[in-house]
Image (cartoon, rainbow, N blue to C red):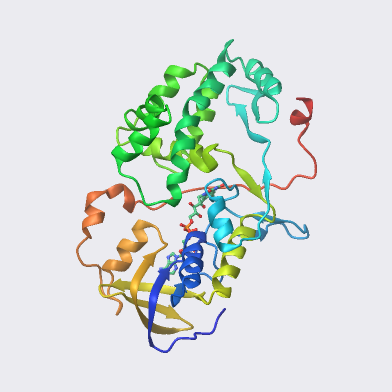
């Protein structure tokens, strides 16, 4: 969408800054509830990090450009919004080369324990390591099954969540997840460094954390990787992540939300005043509620920026409380499209 349907100063019930899949979901829910919603996305298309692309010229395949697996999408959201998406089970969760021996690779095959156990042996993991790996994840399963339903309910307090875990027989898993760096538990439970590294991926990917950080950011990341659906399964969306965002966009628009792309928000001020630049002109819209679907570092900039182009005022209280929230990201993803499986995989 490129035209601007708004006058220079329009009022809404809610303005959503940023059109990633979370902003689209919020727009869909609010519009379905009868609210007047404006979503502002600075890129030419919504979806944020959950988009598909035809990545290779001449190859008619749409791939997830960034985010590529679905686990944290509750069935309730799919049902509430009537999303038409297809998720395929991912059988192989990782295939990790041994940095010390290019000929050895650790395959985690969720559909074949025997093959995975053989792969553990092939990379030199000690006897019993596959069993320890299996028990390690099983130990958290009762906890994640208990916590998953809370994702669609009001956020429980720490003591409420702890009680919930205890009632599910997962008090030890709760303590392991919330009291000590997850790196300690991984080091105690598993012996092989390659296996430890595969498990640590769930704790460190997408963060700047270390396995032994005392602020436990890595534990939070680990929990998010295990809690989806209560099982920690990660599924592949057919058509890539763009198919998921596309459905959210379709639902939001059908419910009456206004989704404006190429609309770069430049400031968010008290009283729900949002300034943005669109089609070469500056605009202002107001709302009772402003929802930020942008990174904390972006929100901080918007709250402190002067829409006339001035410089930042003092940092917000939330910024000074947690400086980690103000870090910019740094990620690399390499997309490959294979015509056939690599030879080393075929041998397994
Ligand atoms: C390489 C990579 C792989 C990943 N893999 C997975 C995965 O497999 N599974 C998974 O669950 N998660 C994965 N993630 C994480 C996941 O992508 C994010 O958690 C998720 O996309 C966040 O969605 P969001 O809607 O909250 O925000 P985003 O997708 O970040 O959307 C924010 C939007 O705000 C817009 N915006 C920013 N500033 C402004 C502004 N000033 N004005 C207007 N709009 C603005 C941006 O353009 C963007 O569209 C991955 C992330 C990356 C980077």
Does residue 271 appear to the left or right of 171 in the view shown? Answer: left
In depth, the one of 291 and 316 nearer the eye is 291
In this view, 167 is above or below 71: above
Residue at position x 53%, y 77% from top? 256
* Residue 210 in view: no
In the image, residue 55 lies at what x, y percent? 68, 57
Specify the farthest residue to the bottom. Answer: 7
Residue 185 appears left or right of 241: left
Identity of the residue furthest to the front in this view: 167
Give 30 or 201, whichever is nearer the viewer.
30
Q: Residue at x 54, y 67 (%)?
A: 46
Residue positioned 69% across, 56% down in the render: 239
Left or right of 50, for residue 288 = left
The image shows residue 342, relative to residue 52, as above or below, that is above
Asked where in the image residue 112 lies, by quadrant, the reply is top right
Q: Quadrant of the N terminus?
A: bottom right
The reply to whether residue 247 is in sight is: yes
Q: What's the residue at 48%, 68% (across, down)?
A: 27
Task: Establish if 99 lies above or below 157.
Answer: above
Residue 307 placement (x, y as % from top left): 31, 77
Q: 147 above or below 270?
A: above
Q: Position of residue 170 (x, y in %)?
A: 42, 28
Residue 85 image offset from top left, x and y in percent: 66, 57
Residue furthest out toward the top? 127
Split into 4 quadrants, where in the image is the C terminus?
top right
Q: How many marks?
A: 0
């Amino acid at each position: 969408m490129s035209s601007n349907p708004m006058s220079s100063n329009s009022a809404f019930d809610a303005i959503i800054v940023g059109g990633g899949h979370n902003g689209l979901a919020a727009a869909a829910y609010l519009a379905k509830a009868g609210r007047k919603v404006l979503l502002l996305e600075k890129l030419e298309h919504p979806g944020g990090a959950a988009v598909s692309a035809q990545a290779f010229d001449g190859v008619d395949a749409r791939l997830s450009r960034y985010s590529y697996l679905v686990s944290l999408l509750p069935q309730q959201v799919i049902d509430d919004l009537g999303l038409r998406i297809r998720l395929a089970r991912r059988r192989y969760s990782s295939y990790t080369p041994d940095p010390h021996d290019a000929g050895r690779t650790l395959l985690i095959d969720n559909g074949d324990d025997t093959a995975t156990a053989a792969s553990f042996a092939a990379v030199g993991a000690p006897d019993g390591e596959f069993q320890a790996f299996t028990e390690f994840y099983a130990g958290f399963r009762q906890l994640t099954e208990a916590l998953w339903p809370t994702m669609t309910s009001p956020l429980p307090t720490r003591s409420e969540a702890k009680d919930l875990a205890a009632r599910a027989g997962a008090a030890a898993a709760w303590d392991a997840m919330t009291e000590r760096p997850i790196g300690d538990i991984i080091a105690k439970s598993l012996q092989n460094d390659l296996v430890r590294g595969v498990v640590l991926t769930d704790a460190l990917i997408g963060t700047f954390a270390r396995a032994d950080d005392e602020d436990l950011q890595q534990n939070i990341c680990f929990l998010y990787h295990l809690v989806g659906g209560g099982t920690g399964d990660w599924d592949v969306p057919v058509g890539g992540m763009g198919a998921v965002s596309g459905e959210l966009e379709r639902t939001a628009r059908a419910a009456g939300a206004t989704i404006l792309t190429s609309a770069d928000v430049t400031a968010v001020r008290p009283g729900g005043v949002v300034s943005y630049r669109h089609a070469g002109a500056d605009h202002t819209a107001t709302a009772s509620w402003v929802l930020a679907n942008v990174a904390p570092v972006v929100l901080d900039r918007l709250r402190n920026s002067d829409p006339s182009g001035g410089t930042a005022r003092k940092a917000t209280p939330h910024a000074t409380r947690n400086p980690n929230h103000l870090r910019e990201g740094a990620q690399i993803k390499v997309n490959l499209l294979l015509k056939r499986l690599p030879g080393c995989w075929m041998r397994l």
